[in-house]
Image (cartoon, grey):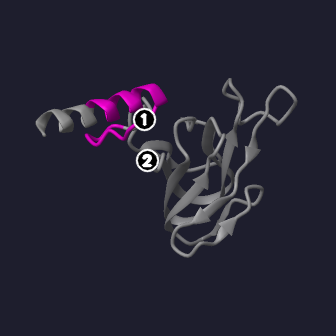
């Protein structure tokens, strides 16, 4: 009986290796050979239209969850940007044939409201604390940008998930 169980275990392991089946690492790491990056700060206490400080490599992730926290009666527009290009685009330069990126739709995790990428999140003198999801199938680079600013402070953070 012991030989049969050992044989089955060896067979399953061999099949997994031959078929290229990956597994989830449960010690806080990621899967598919990528480490878990944890949460990354993309905009850190910005008080004006921002330049791109951090561009997140979304390659190993199916979804990105973004957190937005504002303070001091924020009146501004925050947009989320992404690209599937091999090399990281310059998100603050105009879109072009050689600088390919776009504004991306996000979904509010509180109520499922979708926000068009070209519109972004428009805050009008009200502080907010929210979570959003971005479907990143095929996206390699993602970031956030304050495109219009009147008042307030904003922090945006992101974390990737691969659902494995």
Instruction: Give the camera-side residue of 45 and 64.
Output: 64
Using the image, determine if residue 23 lies above or below residue 66. above
Depth order, front residue of 121/39: 39
Secondary structure under tag 2 reads: loop
Disc 2 marks which residue? 164
Specify few, some or many for label 2: CA neighbours under 10 Å numbering under 14, 14-19, or 20 or more. Answer: few
Question: Which corner quadrant holds the N terminus?
Answer: top left
* Magenta range: 10-29
Give me the C-alpha separation between circle 2 and circle 1. 9 Å
Pair 2/1: label in front: 1
Q: Secondary structure at mark 1?
A: loop
Residue at left 51%, top 68%?
128
- Residue 82 visible in rendering: yes
Task: Answer whether labels 2 and 1 touch (C-beta < 8 Å).
Answer: yes
Which of the 4 image quarters holds residue 83? top right
Residue 119's disc number? none
* Label 1 sits on residue: 22
């Amino acid at each position: 009986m012991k030989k049969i169980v050992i044989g089955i275990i060896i067979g399953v392991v061999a099949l997994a290796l031959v078929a290229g089946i990956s597994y989830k690492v449960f010690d806080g790491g990621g899967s598919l050979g990528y480490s878990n990056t944890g949460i990354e700060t993309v905009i850190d206490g910005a008080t004006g239209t921002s330049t791109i400080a951090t561009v997140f490599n979304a390659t190993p992730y199916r979804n990105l969850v973004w957190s937005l926290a504002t303070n001091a009666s924020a009146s501004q527009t925050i947009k989320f940007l992404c690209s599937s290009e091999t090399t990281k685009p310059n998100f603050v330069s105009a879109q072009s044939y050689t600088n390919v990126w776009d504004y991306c739709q996000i979904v509010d995790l509180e109520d499922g409201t979708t926000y068009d990428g070209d519109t972004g999140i428009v805050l009008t003198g009200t502080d907010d604390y929210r979570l959003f999801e971005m479907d990143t199938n095929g996206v390699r680079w993602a970031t956030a940008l304050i495109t219009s600013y009147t008042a307030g402070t904003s922090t945006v953070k992101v974390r990737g998930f691969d659902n494995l």
